Image (tube, rainbow, N blue to C red):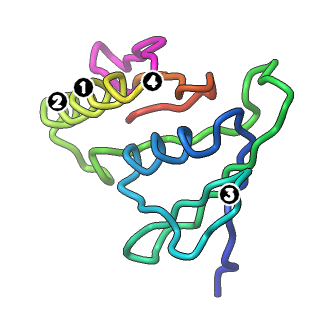
Amino acid sequence: MATHWTLGCDAADPRRLAAFWALALGYVDEPGYDFPEGASIIDPDGKGPAIGFLRVSEPKTAKNRMHVDIRVAGEPPWDMMEREQLIRAKVTELVAAGATAVSEESNGGVLDHVVMYDPEGNEFCVA
């Protein structure tokens, strides 16, 4: 049996970052979570881990040692043209929500993933 776990994240603006990641992942605010220096989001289907955001005063100073990959196309096998369209649509949505597209990575001339920064500069990928 797998262990239940929560991802904890530092943030300058926990509520803003939680709102961004809720949009990115299809999560919702955790009911009953009422901590003024933090925010928490959950998978509405109860399958994924909760993600908590706590206010910290120090800024992010280095590359993440761990990051989130958002897999918009699901699991292989993929229709590569459809997969690229799904990736590009999600990137456009997240840029509108405050993310920054950093680079596109290809494999054999086909889009594999897009490296992005969330609104506080944390790296993640859309694949």
| Residue nearest the observer in this picture, 79 or 125 | 125
Does the magenta segment cover residue 104? yes
At mark 3, the secondary structure is: strand
Residue that appears at 36% across and 22% down: 95
| Residue nearest the observer in this picture, 87 or 14 | 14
From the viewer's perspective, tell me whether residue 65 is left or right of residue 41.
Answer: right
**Residue on which disc 1 sits:** 88
Q: Nearer the viewer, mark 3 or mark 2?
A: 3
Assign the N terminus to one quadrant of the image.
Answer: bottom right
Q: Residues within 10 Å of mark 1 (few under 14, many from 20)?
A: some
**Is there a contact, CB below 8 Å, between mark 3 and mark 1?**
no
State the mark number for residue 85.
2
**Residue on which disc 4 sits:** 99
Q: In the image, which residues are magenta?
A: 99-113
**Residue on which disc 3 sits:** 7
Q: Main secondary structure of the magenta part?
A: strand
